[in-house]
Image (cartoon, rainbow, N blue to C red):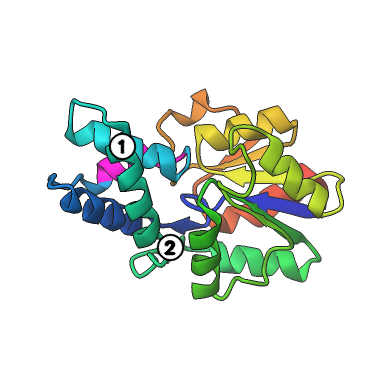
Amino acid sequence: MKIIFDLDGTLIDSAPDINAAGNAVLQDEGFAGVSLAQTRSFIGNGAGMYVKRLEAAVTDAHDPARVERMRLRFAAHYETAHALTHIYPGVQEALAALQSGGWRFGLCTNKPIAPTRTVLAHFGWSDLFDHVIGGDSLPVHKPDPAPLHAVIEAMGGGPVLYVGDSEVDAGTAQAAQVPFALFTQGYRKTPVDKIAHDRAFDDWAQFPAIARGLMGG
């Protein structure tokens, strides 16, 4: 049985590091920083969109050259930003329980692939996933279904469950026509009942039973 996970807001809470990296970029540009709550609301559509939302939050004048400069600086900060990131409670135990039952894992995230690899290594997860796709691994990113389809294909095809925390993840699962489990404690911006999902959960201790129920394993 196969499960493909989102990363930020699903397995890990990386918002504090993203906020710190973003504020460092804003400081370089002479702007005041944004709050952690603002950063959480900006996450979900990739690093490029995050930087655009940063600029919009602090200035009324959109400047493409400034955004590109900020994007490059953000990428440099972000690649090694994991000191403030933590794994959500219960994730390690849930993954271990499923892995011991023969389940295989993939990862499909809009986080750029370089910081994705860095944070996976930081947590000792470099070998946990059969295949990993980041937000810049393909010409498109979620909610386009191509990244999720690429992970599914790399894992040999067949039925999979996708797990994420946001509207972007729900849209990806719908477009890819795969079942979706929604972790409700991540970075979603919409009430749970307004996000398409097969099952929702707020505690990772619940997840192994949910996965078995959805996939029949």
Which residue bears the numbered disc 2? Answer: 79
Residue position for label 1 = 65
- Please tell me whether residue 215 is drawn above or below residue 129 in the rendered image: above
> Does 128 appear in magenta?
no
Residue 201 visible, this orientation: yes
Answer yes or no: do the residues labelled 1 and 2 have beta carbons within 8 Å?
no
Identify whether 190 is placed above or below 134: above
Q: Quadrant of residue 50?
A: top left
Q: Amino acid at mark 2?
A: Glu
Side (left or right) of 133 relative to 78: right
For the point 67% across and 68% down, which residue is it?
128
Horizontal side of 211 relative to 52 (left or right) equals: right
Q: Which residues are magenta?
A: 37-44
Element under label 1? helix
Residue 39, how many percent across, how many down? 30, 44
Give the quarter of the image for residue 58. Answer: top left
* Lower position in the chain sequence, tag 1 or tag 2: 1
What label sits on residue 112 in the rendered view? Answer: none
Question: Which class describes the residues within 10 Å of circle 2: few (<14), some (14-19), or many (20+)?
Answer: some
Is residue 213 visible to us here? Answer: no
Residue at screen point 48% across, 61% down:
115
37 or 193, which is in the foreground?
37
**Which numbered disc, 1 or 2, marks the residue closer to the eye?**
1
Residue farthest to the front, as pictured = 65
Kindly identify the residue that appears in the image at 18 percent across and 26 percent down. Answer: 60
**Dividing the image into 4 quarters, which one contains the N terminus?**
bottom right
Amino acid type of the residue tagged 1 in the rendering: Ala
Q: Position of residue 206 (x, y in %)?
A: 59, 53
| Mark-to-mark CA distance, 1 and 2 | 22 Å
Query: Who's the residue at 34% across and 53% down the image?
Result: 74
* Label tally: 2
